[in-house]
Image: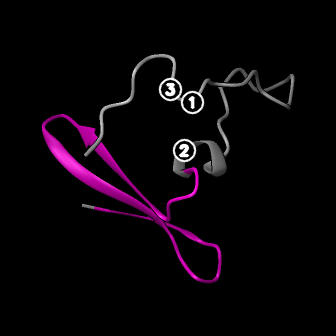
Amino acid sequence: MKNLSSQERPTLKQPVDPVSPLPQVSSQQLLGESDILLIQHQGQQYQLRITKTGKLILTK
């Protein structure tokens, strides 16, 4: 898996909804041209993928 430098990492956008304090990032920013993204969380690896129908699935 390729480690992204801080300059290559997707930047979090300010929320579109000003009422919500949560940052938002688009799936396109996360996945880029790939259909799969590997995520490391607490020593475990997860896979975020987009299906042929456009749904997101997160699996361990």
Q: CA distance from mark 2 to mark 3?
A: 11 Å
Q: x%, y% of residue 17?
A: 86, 31
Residue 55 lies in what quarter of the image? bottom right
Q: Which mark is residue 39?
A: none
The residue singled out by tag 3 in the image is 8
Q: Is residue 42 left or right of residue 30?
A: left
Please count the marks in the image. Answer: 3
| Residue that label 2 marks | 30
Residue 35 sits inside the magenta stretch: yes
Q: Is residue 52 left or right of residue 13?
A: left
Sequence-wise first label, 2 or 1: 1
Nearer to me, 46 or 28: 28
Q: Is residue 33 above or below residue 15?
A: below
Rendered location of residue 29, percent (x, y): 62, 42
Q: Is residue 27 above or below residue 41?
A: below
Amino acid type shown at disc 1: Pro
Reply above or below: 7 against 41. above
Task: Give the structural element (helix, strand or loop) at label 3.
Answer: loop
**Within 10 Å of the Cα at label 2, are there few (<14), some (14-19), or many (20+) other Cα atoms?**
some
Going by the numbered disc 3, the residue's amino acid type is Glu
Secondary structure at badge 1 equals loop
Task: Name the quarter where the C terminus is drawn.
Answer: bottom left
Q: Which residue is mark 1?
A: 10
Identify which residue is drawn at 40% across, 21% down.
5
In magenta segment, residue 50: yes
Q: Which comes sooner in the sequence, label 2 or label 3?
A: 3
Label 3 crowd bin: few (<14), some (14–19), many (20+), radius 10 Å: few
**In the rendered structure, which segment of residues is drawn in magenta?**
32-59
Counting from the top left corner in percent of width and height, residue 31 is at 53, 51
For the residues labelled 3 and 1, the Cα–Cα distance comes to 6 Å
- Name the main secondary structure of what is drawn in magenta: strand
